[in-house]
Each structure stands twice: as C-alpha cells, then as structure tokens.
Image (cartoon, rainbow, N blue to C red):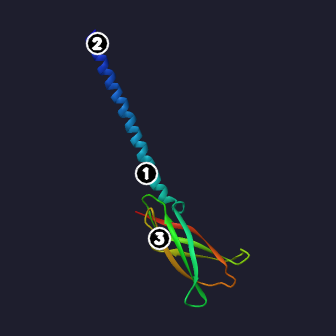
C-alpha cells in the first residue's frame, strides 16, 4: 500500500511538472508572438508611433520668409524612423486654408525620443497659423 501511494505521488508530481512546463512554454510563445507583432506594427504603421507639434513661427532674417520650429516624437519601442513626410496647412485669420505643402524631415528620430526641427518657408499674405500632420515615414532597424 505505502509503495503504491509513493508511486502515485511521483506520478502526480511528474504530471504537474509536465502541465506547468506546457503552460510556461505556451505563455513564452505568446509573449514572443506579441513582441514580434508589435515590432511589425511599428514598421508597417509608422504614423501611429510618430507625433508632431509646431512649437513656434517666427519671422526669418529675410522679410518674405518665416521659420517654423517643430518637434517630432517617436513613441515606438524599437524602431527608428527617417524620411518623415509632413503635410503643412497654412491658415488665415478666418481659419481658411491658404495653402497646403509637404516637406520631409530627413534626420532619423530614435525610438522613445523626440527631436526638434526648423524649417524656413515663404510667408503667405494674411497667414495666421499652421497645422502639421505626418503622412508617412520609413522604419529602419
């Protein structure tokens, strides 16, 4: 009797260890897949991980131009972005769009960081404000 109880306990311990390891391996695979999907998402959808904000507009040294100072923030975990294409909309006092143009921030923005850029543009008559939107970017390793 005692021998069969010991054998039963050993068998139950082995089964418990097997089930525990199976669950642990399944969890590790799921974590690896989630991480891989996240990194793929960073490369496939860069606009989702980039934020842009205009900091200030100031007159340039040349009378018909002005300087836009803006910041790009990269919220991706591992992906660096470069060749960031930006759409700029220029508005008058009535918030009517005067012009829409595009530009490119050629410097790379590292993961979990932000970078400030400056851009010189021709000043439009009745220009009051601008809006900026990231249209696309390239994810690099």
Q: Which mark is residue 115?
A: 3
Q: Position of residue 70 (x, y in %)?
A: 54, 73
Look at mark 1 in the image and give the residue it sits on: 36
Among the 4 quarters of the image, the one containing residue 87: bottom right
Q: Using residue 1 as the reference point, say whether residue 47 is left or right of it.
A: right
Among the 4 quarters of the image, the one containing residue 107: bottom left
Q: Earlier in the sequence, mark 1 or mark 2?
A: 2
Residue depicted at 35% across the width and 27% down the height: 16
Mark whose residue sits in front, 2 or 3 = 3
Q: Which mark is residue 4?
A: 2
- In the image, residue 61 above or below residue 25: below
| Disc 2 to disc 3, C-alpha distance | 70 Å
Q: Which mark is residue 110?
A: none
Q: Earlier in the sequence, mark 3 or mark 1?
A: 1
| Mark 1 and mark 2 residues within 8 Å of each other at the beta carbon | no
- In the image, residue 35 above or below residue 59: above
Q: Earlier in the sequence, mark 2 or mark 3?
A: 2
Which residue is farthest right? 94
| Mark 3 and mark 1 residues within 8 Å of each other at the beta carbon | no
Residue depicted at 45% across the width and 48% down the height: 34
Mark whose residue sits in front, 3 or 1 = 3
Count every numbered label the image shows and give the total: 3
């Amino acid at each position: 009797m005692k021998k069969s109880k010991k054998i039963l306990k050993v068998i139950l311990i082995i089964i418990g260890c097997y089930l525990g390891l199976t669950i642990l391996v399944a969890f590790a695979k799921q974590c690896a897949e989630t991480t891989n999907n996240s990194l793929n998402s960073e490369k496939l959808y860069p606009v989702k991980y980039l934020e842009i904000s205009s900091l200030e507009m100031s007159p340039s040294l040349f009378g018909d131009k002005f300087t836009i100072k803006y910041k790009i923030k990269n919220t991706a975990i591992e992906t660096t972005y470069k060749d960031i294409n930006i759409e700029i909309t220029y508005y008058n006092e009535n918030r009517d769009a005067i012009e829409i143009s595009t530009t490119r921030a050629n410097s790379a923005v590292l993961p979990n960081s932000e970078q400030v850029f400056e851009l010189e543009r021709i000043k439009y008559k009745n220009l009051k404000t601008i809006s900026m939107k990231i249209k696309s970017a390239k994810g690099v390793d």
